[in-house]
Amino acid sequence: MQEPAFSRLPALPSWLLSQAALRAGRLVADGFAAEGARGYHYRLLGTLAEAGPSSQAELGRRSGIHLSDVVAALNELEADGYVKRAPDPADKRRNVVTVTPKGDERLRKLDEKIAAVQDDVLAPLDETERTQLVELLRRLLEA
């Protein structure tokens, strides 16, 4: 990390958090890019794996992705055979999205990639510090 010319910044937790988030975000994006994926792909596949078949709108709400971005990412995932969309039998105006076996395998590989990225991001910390950091960050997000 390059130290800023303004010496007060490195003492500010907000600045440190933002710099750490930028670094982590770059590593995550690069890790997914190396697999030909994006973070939205991982979030959508993970949401489908945990919640089961869902409408596109439900996927957006559950994954925290805007609906227009959900549709674009699902188009990519569907083109690669990772998900399939079918009309909802109860409401033909909406699609139900299901992860395919190929999508389950893709998610497993992305899980492995994101785990490796987490190890890179947290390399300077031991297991106890990693656990403590996660707990502290969760508390900040709940505030």
Image (tube, rainbow, N blue to C red):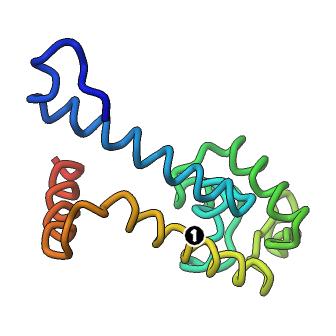
The residue under label 1 is which amino acid type?
Answer: Thr
Q: Is residue 63 left or right of residue 57?
A: left
Mark 1 lies on residue: 47
Residue nearest the viewer, comparing 90 with 63: 63
Q: Position of residue 100 (x, y in %)?
A: 79, 81
Q: Residue at x 51, y 54 (%)?
A: 28
Q: Secondary structure at mark 1?
A: helix
Q: Residue at x 14, y 57 (%)?
A: 136
Q: Position of residue 55 (x, y in %)?
A: 71, 64
Residue 88, by quadrant, is bottom right
Q: Is residue 10 left or right of residue 101?
A: left
Identify whether 94 is placed above or below 71. below
Extreme-top residue of the structure: 6
Q: Position of residue 110 (x, y in %)?
A: 61, 71
Residue 39, by quadrant, is bottom right
Residue nearest the viewer, comparing 125 with 86: 125
